[in-house]
Image (cartoon, helix red, strand yellow):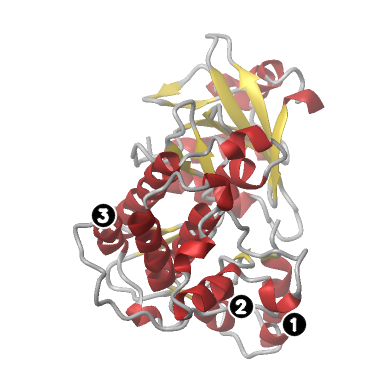
Amino acid sequence: MNLSACISCFSSSSGTDVSRHAEQDQGNFRVFSYNELKSATTDFHHSKKIGEGGFGSVYKGRLRDGSFVAVKVLSIELDSMRGEREFIAEIASLSDIKHENLVTLRGCCVDGAKRYVVYDYMENNSLAHILHGVDQKKRLSFSWEARRDISLGVARALSFLLEEVEPHIIHRDIKASNILLDKNFTPKVSDFGLSKLLRDNHTHVSTRVAGTLGYLAPEYAISGHLTRKSDVYSFGVLLLEIVSGRPAVDFRVDYKDQLLVQKAWEAYEAKELVNLVDPKLETNFPVEEAVRFLKVGLLCAQENLRLRPLMSAVVKMLTSETDLQDVQISEPGKVSDFMNIRTQQTPLSEGSSTSSGMSNMWSSVNLGR
C-alpha cells in the first residue's frame, strides 16, 4: 500500500463519501469509515482517551473483529492546513515500511476536516509514561534489562529509517512519549507527523524548525537545516533519559540544572557517570554497561554533528561490538533559550519571509509537551 491508495480518501473533503471505501482492504492497510471508528471508540468518549499531542488526541478502540487499535484524531487548521501535512507525512512514512520496532499502521479515515490514523494498540502506553508517569510501581519494576532492550530497539529502528530505507526518513521528533511499548515492552517508534524524506543526493532538508525542546539538535534549531544527525542527537538525549530516569528538560529545578545533556556532561567530566544512573535501579544494573550507554548518549549529542556516529555504529556501540575504551567525547550541543534562537536569520524552505519564518519557527516548536 503506498500513499496514492490513501490519497483517494481525501476526495471526501470535497464532498465524496469516504464510507464507500470502508470495506476496501489494501493489503494490511485499510481505509476505515468514520462510523466504524466512532463505534470502536464509543463515540470518542473521554474514558477512551489515552494520549494527546501537538496534532490531536489518541483514543483506544475495539474493532468489530475484536482487535484493539489506537485512533489518532488530527484536526485540520484550514488557514495553514496544519494537520493535513502531518496526516500525509504519517501515511507516507509508514504505509510501505515494516520493522519490529516501528508502530504498525492499520489504516486511515477522512471525514470532513478530520483526519484519523489507526495503529495497533500498545498495552504499556509510552516510554514517557513509564519513566515519568504517576505509576511508581511501573517505574520501580522498570529493570535494566528492559531499558537495554528498549534502547537497542529504538536504535535499530532509527538505523533502519536513516540508513536502510530509500529515501531516508528523518523522524524529527524522537522523544520518550513517541516510543510506545507493547505488552512485552517491545519499543515501537511512533508519531511520524513531522517526518521528512531525505534522498541520497541531498545532505540536508531546509524546513520549518519543529520538535521538542531538550531533544532538538542545536544546529537544526538555529539553521533550519535538518540532517540524519539531527535524529542521532535526539536519540542521544533519549538514551541519557532511559538510563538516568530524568526528563530531557526539568523545569522544576534551577535553570543551570534543567538540561539533561548538561548534567550528563558534568558527570562525564567529573568521571562520575555512574552517579547519573536512575536510583530506582538501586544496584541492580551492570555498571560497565550502564556507563557505556551514557557515553554513547553523549557521543550522539555532541555539538559538532560531524562527530556524531551513524545509527548503525550506535547499535554496535550498544552491543559492545565497538570498543569505547579510548573514545574521545566533546561537549554536547544545547538549546536552552528559544528567545535567542527566534531572532536569528534562519533560512526556511517554504517561501516564508524572514520575519514570518521566525514566527512560524517559534510557534511550531513543542516546548517540552
Q: Residue furthest front?
A: 283
In-front residue for pair 287/118:
287
Query: What residue is pinned by disc 2?
Result: 335
Tell me the CA gap for discs 1 and 2: 10 Å
In-front residue for pair 223/293:
293
Disc ID at residue 131 = none
Residue 202: x %, y % from top left:
33, 74
SS of the residue under disc 1: helix
User: Which badge, 1 or 3, comes first in the chain's sequence?
Assistant: 3
**Number of residues whose C-alpha sits closer than 10 Å to that of mark 3, classed few (under 14), some (14–19) or many (20 or more):** few
Residue 326: x %, y % from top left:
24, 77
Residue 59: x %, y % from top left:
68, 30
Q: Amino acid at mark 2?
A: Val
SS of the residue under disc 3: helix
For the N terminus, the image quarter is top left
| Residue 358, quarter of picture | bottom right
Q: Residue at x 64, y 33 (%)?
A: 137
Residue 45: x %, y % from top left:
79, 24
Disc ID at residue 164 = 3
In the image, taking residue 162 as reference, residue 116 lies left or right, namely right
Q: Amino acid at mark 3?
A: Glu
Proximity of marks 1 and 3: CB atoms separated by less than 8 Å: no
Query: What residue is pinned by disc 1?
Result: 339
SS of the residue under disc 2: loop
Q: Is residue 129 visible?
A: yes
Q: Residue at x 62, y 31 (%)?
A: 71
Q: Amino acid at mark 1?
A: Met
In-front residue for pair 84/17:
84
Proximity of marks 1 and 2: CB atoms separated by less than 8 Å: no
